[in-house]
Image (cartoon, coloured by chain):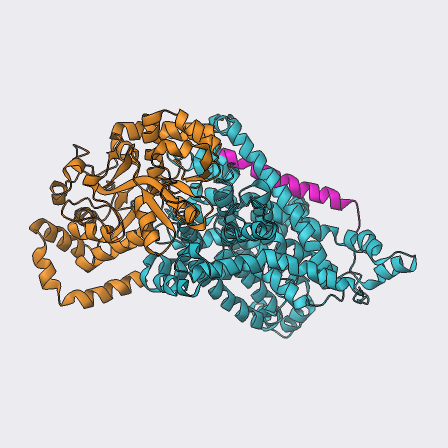
Chain colours: A cyan, B orange
Amino acid sequence: MTISSLPETATAHTDRRGWAALLQRLRHLEPSSLLWIVLIAILIFLVVSPMVRLFIASLEAKGTGALTIANYITAYSRERYIDALLNSLALGAGTAVLSVVIAVPMAWAVSRTDMPGKRFAWLVVLGAFIVPPYLGAIGWILLAGPNSGWMNQAWTWITGAEDGIFNVYSFPGLVIIIALNAFPFVFIFTKAALDLVSSEMEDAANILGAGTLTTTFKVTLPLVWPAILAGFIIVFLEAIALFGTPALIAIPARFNVVTTQLWQFFVYPIQVGVASAYAMPLLLVTVALIWVQKLVLARKGFVSQTGKGGERRMIELGPMRWVLFGYCFFIGLFAVLLPMIVLIQASFSKAWGRGLTLDNLTLHNYAYLLFDHDMAQQSIINTFIYAIGAACFAALLALCIAYIVNRRLVPLGDVLGFLCMAPFVIPGIVLAIGFYAAYASPPLALYGTATLMILAFTARFLPIAYANSAAAMRTVHPEMEEAVRILGGGRLQAIRAVVAPLLKRSIAGGWLLVFILATRELSAAIFLVGPTTRTISVVLYDLSEEGNFEVLAALGGILLVITLVFVLIGFKVAGRDFMLRRS
Amino acid sequence: MARGLIAFAAAVSIGLSLGASAAEMTDHEKQLYEAAKENGEQVTWYVAHFNSETAEAVGKAFEEKYPGVSVNVVRTTAQVAYQRLMQDLQAGVSQCDVFSSTDVGHYVALKEEGQLMEYRPENAEKIYDAYKDIDPDNTYHVTSAGLVLITYNTKEVSEEEAPKNWTDLLDPKWKDKVSVGHPSYSGYVGTWVVAMRKLYGWDFFEKLEENNPQIGRSINDTVTMLNSGERTVAAGPAATTLRSAARGNPIAVIYPTDGTLLMIAPSGIPKVSENPNAAKLYMEFLMSPEAAQVQVENFSESVRPEVPPAPGGRPLSEVETIRPTIEEISEGIPEVKELWRDTFGV
């Protein structure tokens, strides 16, 4: 995904020639121009309007609607609120750094070396990706609760110590849990970039006497620096926008972050204005991050693709390859295996406090959810309808726009591309508040409707679908369509007969990515759900408050099983490496 | 969709016995039921009274008694339920038909803003005298009662060692062992904090802080913490704890000598409800012996004197209870929320 191109596109098209060309075009209006207008309208609805509405709300006095800065004063006048903001920044930075530490060696090992068990490493990444963050967090509470966690009990049993050594209810605990869940973003970007670096560049360093390590740190990794940075920024944004995990971990650990604080502004009396004002720094921070990224990357060349098809050889590591495999296994153990084992144990227990015994086994939790719990049944159906709806809508929108932008069919096409990528810098919870401010009330009165959920999910994950489509579109040369058109076919026919079949797998891959992310989405959903539009993630969040971990774990299990079925179908359609295909 | 199917199945299976149950209905009930059915009404119930299993069971019992009128159960903590209702009202949409919080203050505020419908259920006459007519203007009525008491993990703590009264929780021997909920999320916890402040002053919480309690959100969070052995003693709810103990989890309750907190939790109908008949019928039902029976089976307290408590629970007449007044609760909870954040940091 090329976030680095985002700010460029923002500035590239403000020249007057674009407008002149637009006027020119309006004279002979074509169907593609009409489509352009429709797409612009959709994007304004999905992206621009909620954000503008959010900004306006932050400047409005409650009730009267008069212009005021009182909201900002309220939002920043208390030390507690400022602390929460600082906590979030530290959380984002810590999580992103840790994710890089976890993911880059894995990506390097899988992409560049002869490490055994690459498929296992893949499963680890996929596993971490489909587990919803708050579900992983609950697994970790069972694992590393300071007194009762399995890991701490093992520790005291082995060492005879009085107290355990891990405390999940702490700032480092929160950072580790989120990083173990979010590192696939860094892995995906880094691996995709590493796959393009040809061995020749490494050979040059080797010939000059550099060892494998030196080469890796001086040549290989610097070449993929943009990809690592992109992953870093995504994880940063993901971490500061998370709601469920901090609610589970940070409150017992006695600190607030921006999202848990935003939640407080929504408790009576609802202060949408204050919440909006409080959300503004998140936007500024993310814009600043992207700007820094551009600055850092602007000065150097990172061209590793020469189009000359350099040779790629796997680096032979000797015995060290087992050390690397051990590292991947270690990550897999903590990111996926252990949390899943404790959750599965809980989901089949009558009382998970009693541990693993035969007479404690039961299927009742699953049966109860599937047959007796109406809210759970409905939430399962809702989750998959919304995820499928959002994935289809986002994929279609992204494909249309990627096509138009790539083929330069309309003036100012880059604006479209920019708008598609814009939600990327908007944390989910902020986007949700924008949607609430813009569309909850009449005239649209979408609050509590399925439409609102699907639209919000679409907007939230549009950048992923767009980056995927745009990359795919670059691989299809226009000559093939031109052949259709020369032979008398229209553009639509060209798309249907040439572009669509060629891009089938890529589109399916993008669809699947959005689908997975939408099934686990909580931070936007929690603000927008109504009584009949609850999703599994929201029900899980509510169950987490009730001490009912057996049922909660079972619902999490159901979510994962259904998601896995979709992923396996997706493998068939999109190919096993669907998460990676970027070029 | 699932709801529709189940309602249909219930209608079919109950169809035969309909004559019998219809005969038990009062004229007033029958009127509401007919009107609700005629208008295709259904109830959306924002409920914090019970845990989700009990709430779902109450909803089901209603559907069985009144086939054709379905219930949409939305179970959350009290503050979340209130927040959702406020979001609805602010957005100008009507979603909630019956609002069952555990924080009496919510009703005081809603009533002040004129958001509650006046309605006196017939069953309002038949609940415990102590629960009757908490709002003279009939905008809300007591539909549930619950107890907050001391709970403990029986594997880690013997009955002799366990705290006997609230101030025992302040003993340094319970350092790093106490679990509580959060007054910003839970109405039960908020009321408990108000009651403790009334008994012992805010000093109680300053001292509790020194024992480094584990702070969750819902009062039911304490059950999780005790089950896992993460914490060993707690200020917890009777209902969820007894239910969890009955499942085989190693936890038990103690009725503190300085008073078990008796929580009364009302329900009301938002004025904007688009299903007024079904909502009124639901209010009747919440105060009926059938609903009380379901609650008792789920280890909650009954609001009807004729329905005895669950096995393992004591009848209220044998429990030393404390109960802050409505004014103390509605004024006290916002105050203690702030104090709580100052003392505990979240």
Q: What secondary structure predominates along the stretch shown in magenta?
A: helix
Answer whether residue A284 is magenta in the image. Answer: yes
Q: Nearer the viewer, residue A6 or B293?
A: B293
Q: Position of residue B277 (x, y in %)?
A: 17, 49
Residue located farthest toward the right when viewing the structure as drawn: A208
Q: Nearer the viewer, residue A256 or B276?
A: A256
Query: What residue appears at the point 13 percent right and 44 percent down from the top-left corner?
Result: B123
Q: Nearer the viewer, residue A470 or B157?
A: B157
Q: Quadrant of the C terminus of chain A?
A: bottom right
Range covered by the magenta-colored residues? A277-302
Q: Is residue A24 left or right of residue A441?
A: right
Q: Is residue A327 left or right of residue A202?
A: left
Q: Position of residue B205 (x, y in %)?
A: 41, 29
Q: Nearer the viewer, residue A374 or A6?
A: A374
Q: Position of residue A141 (x, y in %)?
A: 51, 49
Residue B135, picture quadrant: top left
Residue A194 drawn above or below residue A265: below
- Please state the total of marks drawn on the protein image: 0
Residue A236, picture quadrant: top right
Q: Quadrant of the N terminus of chain A?
A: bottom right
Query: What residue appears at the point 66 percent right and 48 percent down from the top-left corner?
Result: A98
Residue located farthest toward the bottom when viewing the structure as drawn: A487
* Residue A476 visible in rendering: no
Q: Position of residue A76 (x, y in %)?
A: 52, 28
